[in-house]
Image (spheres, grey):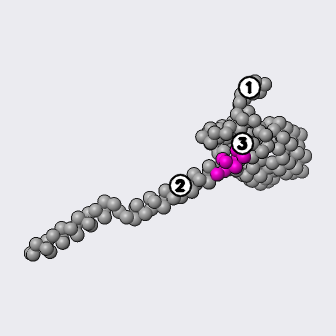
Amino acid sequence: MPVELAKHQRITALIVKFQAMLNLENITALLARFAEVRAEVDAEYSALDELIVWADKNLISHYCFDEESQWWSGLPRDKGVLLSLTTLDLRKSKFSTIPECIGILSNLKRLNLKDSQLHHLLDSIGKLINLEILELSGNQLQHLPEMIGQLVNLKVLELKGNHLLAVPETTDNLVNWKL
């Protein structure tokens, strides 16, 4: 066998081994997944920015300990803290609606919106899948969104002092809750 042919075959074999090690399809899939994750993170941070702007616009205090209620109240401005929140107390904050981006706070277990002059609750409330306590007493609500039925972990839903005309049929999905 001529030396050149042997050299070519050896180089070809090395290239095949190298391609197998790299597996271009896996790298392409990995890069595509990285782009998806990056887009999700960008969207998440954009929603957090929107939530912080909404809080500032509505004069919602920064996160602090409320001696009266013995709870942390207000909205943190740190994105890492926001994403890990389990309790959010915005009572008496005087806003008519909460932003769509509230759904980004998927770790929330308790959301207190009592006495906030809330007129409208958006469907994004249904994204708070870990929510156990939702306090809406003393607002101006006439309707609840259908998506409230997505809150399968909800145990307490406080609605006193609102002007509710009806409760959505989707609340039938909430087997663990009490009014």
Disc 3 is placed on an element classified as loop
Looking at the rendering, in which quadrant would you find the N terminus? bottom left
Q: Which of marks 2 and 1 is in front?
A: 2
Verify CB contact (< 8 Å) between mark 3 and mark 1: no
Looking at the rendering, in which quadrant would you find the C terminus? top right
Q: Disc 2 and disc 3: Cα gap in Å?
A: 29 Å
Is residue 49 one of those drawn in magenta?
A: yes
- Quarter location, residue 67: top right
User: The residue under label 1 is which amino acid type?
Assistant: Gln
What secondary structure characterizes most of the magenta part?
A: helix
Residue at 70% over, 49% down? 50
The 10 Å Cα crowd at callout 1, few under 14, some 14 to 19, many 20 or more, is few
Residue at 31% over, 60% down? 21
Who comes first in sequence, dot 2 or dot 1? 2
Name the residue carrying label 3. 154
Q: Which of marks 2 and 3 is in front?
A: 2
Magenta region, residue range: 46-53
Q: Can residue 174 be seen in this view?
A: no
Name the residue carrying label 1. 70
User: The residue under label 2 is which amino acid type?
Assistant: Val
Q: Is residue 21 visible?
A: yes
Residue at 26% over, 66% down? 15
Is residue 132 one of those drawn in magenta?
A: no
User: The residue under label 3 is which amino acid type?
Assistant: Leu
